[in-house]
Image (spheres, helix red, strand yellow):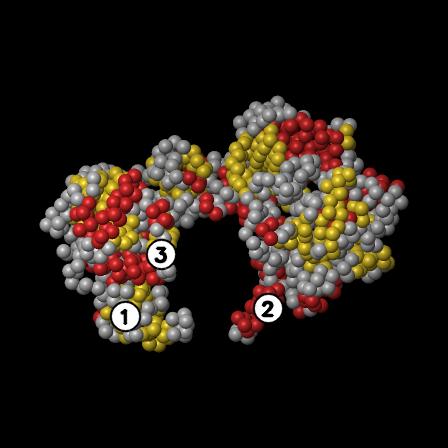
Amino acid sequence: MSTRLATGGRLLNKSKALNFSFNGTTLKGFEGDTLASALLANDQVLMGRSFKYHRPRGVVASGAEEPNGLVNLGEGGKFEPNQRVTTTELFDGLKAKSQNHWPSLEFDVGAVNAKLSRFMPAGFYYKMFIHPRSFWKHVYEPIIRHAAGLGAAPKDRDADTYEHFYAFCDVLIVGGGIAGLQAAKAAGATGAKVILVEQTAHLGGRAPVDGGMVKGQSVADFITATVADLEAMDNVTVRTRMMGSGVYDHGYVLGYERLTDHAPEMTGPRHRLWRIRAAQTITATGAIERPLSFAGNDIPGVMLASAVRDYAVNFGVSSGDRTVVVTNNDDAYRTAIALKHAGLDVPAILDARPAGTDSDLMTQAKALGIRIMMGHGIATVKGGKRVTGVEVCAQAGEGAVLEEIVCDAVAMSGGWSPVVHLWSHCGGKLTWDDTQASFRPDPNRPPLGDRGQAFVRAAGSANGETTLNAVLSDATACGAAAAKAAGFKSKAAKAPTADEPTERAMIPVWLMPQGAGYKLRSKTWLDYQNDVKVSDVQLAAQEGFTSVEHAKRYTTLGMATDQGKLSNINGLAILSDALNQPIPQTGTTTFRPPYTPISMGSIGGEARGDVFQPIRRTPMYDWHEANGADWEPVGQWRRPYAYVRDGETVHDAVMRETKNTRENLGLLDASTLGKLIVKGPDAGKFLDMMYTNMMSTLKVGKCRYGLMCSENGFLIDDGVVARVSEDKFLCHTTTGGAETIHGHMEEWLQTEWWDWDVYVANVTEQYAQVAVVGPNARKALEALGGMDLSAEALGFMEWADGTLGGFDVRAYRISFSGELSYEIAVPASQGQAFWDALVKVGADLGAMPYGTECLHILRAEKGFIMIGDETDGTVIPQDLGLHWAISKKKDDFLGKRAQQREHMVSDERWKLVGLETVDGSTLPDGAYAVGEGTNANGQRNMIGRVTSSYHSPNLDRGIAMGLVLHGPSRMGEVITFPGTDGKDYQAKIVNAVFYDPEGEKQNV
Amino acid sequence: MLILECPCCGITAEETEFHGGGEAHLKRFGPDSEDKDFENYLFMRENPKGVHFERWRHNNGCGKWFHAARCTMTLEVFGTYSAQTYEPPKALCDAISAKRPGWSWGAFS
């Protein structure tokens, strides 16, 4: 069994016991434990189930690379799935639940999949679920959806807060192991600003576990001294619990700091995302041990040799009473020796290498009385939810069992792979190292920065170094070189020297035994989380998936939440073997950030709730709010959709406002409309290019409705243009369009017609604007008094400056409703006062404020188009019958050439018409009309669609506009719109002007 | 995230301060142009593996458009310059040719 040892546990504070729960059972651990070590200390080796076959799974690693030990952590607003037990620090009251099983971890129905695994090879889903076609939607998909997904999705809103933090430095070091610390010291000595980040809570990495002497001190003491040196340097910042998540273009690095995960009682943000700009980045990210591929290597109790050693030394936890060590290298001997020193039994070391000269570590192991079997390996592991023994075979053969050894744990080591992720994120290339059988960074092909300079360097074991001396000297040189590249001079830095045992070279072992038959290979796991076996990768190769990227996606190797940190190299070795080509020729899949999953909350940072995005409010916002506004977001603006009174529904309010505006007087806050000043000697010439209309001939004091198209010919914006003076125009844009249209104008002015004398200023927020609309509009303004607004003094489509009720105003006589209508602009600071004055004089004239929905109905009753309703980026003015607004006298304007293209002049383009339902009901917005026959896919042919649809209270019926094939020549025809509610709607094609077609109401 | 220097205001800033505007030095074809020329102007773009000339706007800064010469493979930025020109400055082209032997302005691979 796995249990807490009487000795060991250098990271524990044994004076502080902690309570936590796993699947509802209360267990005990110590301060300093990870959830993994605390579970092992309680003999909870079974921690979860695998994704596809629901196989029992125990922890296999001790760090970020862990594929198996994933749990649902926390409750309510603090719930989070897929948390790795190895990187979860224990705290008092921690609640964890295992995942991927039903009904329980011990007994799981889905495990029947494992019995069927022979019939569920690579590509099973693609092959199985394609026939019969109709089964997909009703049978396969619901079952797969039920089974899919890892862990449970959180249901409550995240209760924690998060933040972003910006940092700049000369040298950033990712990894606080012995290499990172040494590099930081070398870089810091030059005076460079250094930041060092370490993903765990402890500095020093695995060096204290692996042992050795540096400068006559133990490694642990050397590290303590180095950390003290760094703390004394003002130019060096060291952060623990912070992962280098990704390296991006030009030296941009994301750091992911976990502030309160280990101590939820702390206040402040839970995670902090550091956005770091570093001149030079050093990846001192260490190496990850590879599993060995033998049958049953996924049974709980089979662990990486380094992890078994970590649990014993760091946490004082035994992974089992009797541990068989299986290896192809010397490092695993350290595990055997550590276990022996802890008083545990190691019945054998199965070393796949042939017999030869003993190294220091082998001699030490022998001296401790451990049986060493050279040239041997594991044929298969015995056990179900827990290892019960191993069958020993010769590595060279096909797996004939020579003997069985009873044990309850297996410590395996297939060699070490440098963590090259961060090196690779931004284009760093790898080279194959034959002696270590691993990919390591190729210093000749590093990631390049903005001036073409190398900006990432790898140090220590992340650079492929394997001995303490080599790591220290590589890290020292790397730290100094990075500082120099960042512009800091250094004296030749001297690396400390270490005493360490000699090691015998490893040999690559990709399959154990070498000649394992299908039966063994189909029980030999490569990817533990996604259940990918050696036989699956071989099948993929056999079926033609020869590219490593294709084989990955076909088998799902390395596609789980651990992204194949343990499985990738082993998998591509198997693939290379199947393809009969060397590993470097197969290559690796692409390494992408983040290194391990980071929280969504940290990515969002502070941008949530009220500060998710800026909200734009007009000067009259508070009045609207106090008077029942039902808000509608329009871009970043908030506009009243309707003003809802007590006892009314929103629909009631819209109907009331729409009738009242036609009968009495409506007031609209139109301040959000874009207002661009275009000024300069060439302003008229410029607007002639911007608009389809001729603007240069507009007289001072007059207004003109203009259409704006992109160079592709499509309608992008519309609005009224007023000529303020000879060289100055005021262009109104749509509410959402001010910034983009301003940008559009600037783009053409700066990049095409840069010699034209024109300046554009966006003054949208400088003015409040009120539309005064309805039969009583003139009376209300006359009651304010101050300027002549008679039909003679201010005609339709004219503007004038003056005063009204003591306010300096600019009055435009324009109408988007078909009513007698003025839009009055006042300085923004006067907006609320002017609105109050209007409300006061309007009280006797039936004045009511109205919102955007009423505005829409009023314009639709008149057949006026709305950008975004009648247009969608594929509509040209000609489609909307707006030929009258397209100047034929101009040689050029944006969109003119495009509107001459074959498809743009086709008779088959859908054209704007009015639509009237036969029964007076309201057409569903966006519904499509169906015509005769079917298309190539057997679908009914479409002949049009609804672009705007409303119930008109003034006409007491549904009205709509739509784009219809040959629409204008089909007046009176009835066409069918099938709704999503299953009903067919019949509508007659009519003129789009439903109300006051003669336009008498606005010309009074 | 790229770092670019705005040649108008002289500020070196993060990519988030800028907005990319596609290929630089396109020649506009207007109403009297041939279909083929207009199609090329509107739709056809170079997509080189290597040196590329791009339009950028410093839209969260001075608001000005400028041009950048950049390697699409290594992300090296060879230089930025005014958008108010029909072709890149000679000194910049010479510097790129020195770094990328065989490269010349207007020849795409």
Residue at 34% across / 73% down in the picture? A985
Q: Residues within 10 Å of mark 2 (few under 14, many from 20)?
A: few
Kind of residue indicated by mark 2 = Ile
Q: Chain of mark 3?
A: A
For the residues bearing labels 2 and 3, Cβ distance under 8 angstroms: no
Q: In front: A994, or A1004?
A: A1004
Q: Nearer the viewer, mark 2 or mark 3?
A: 3
Task: Identify whether A753 is placed above or below A404.
Answer: above
Q: In front: A41, or A348?
A: A41
Q: Which residue is mark 3?
A: A644
Q: Nearer the viewer, mark 2 or mark 1?
A: 1
Q: Which residue is mark 2?
A: A143
Residue A746, by quadrant, is top left
Residue at 29% across / 60% down in the picture? A656
Residue A475 at x, y = what percent?
A: 65, 33
Side (left or right) of A716 relative to A127 = left
Who comes first in sequence, dot 2 or dot 3?
2
Who comes first in sequence, dot 3 or dot 1?
3
Side (left or right) of A368 relative to B76 = right
**Distance in Å between CA atoms under marks 2 and 3:** 47 Å
Task: Identify whether A97 is placed above or below A275.
Answer: below
Residue A869, by quadrant, is bottom left
Which element type, helix, strand or loop, lies under badge 3?
A: loop
Residue at 24% across / 72% down in the picture? A970
Residue A902 at x, y = what percent?
A: 27, 62
Tell which residue pokes out farthest to the left in this image: A792
Q: Are marks 3 and 1 on the same chain?
A: yes
Kind of residue indicated by mark 3 = Val
Residue A443 at x, y = what percent?
A: 59, 38
Q: Quadrant of the C terminus of chain A?
A: bottom left
Q: In front: A956, or A135?
A: A956
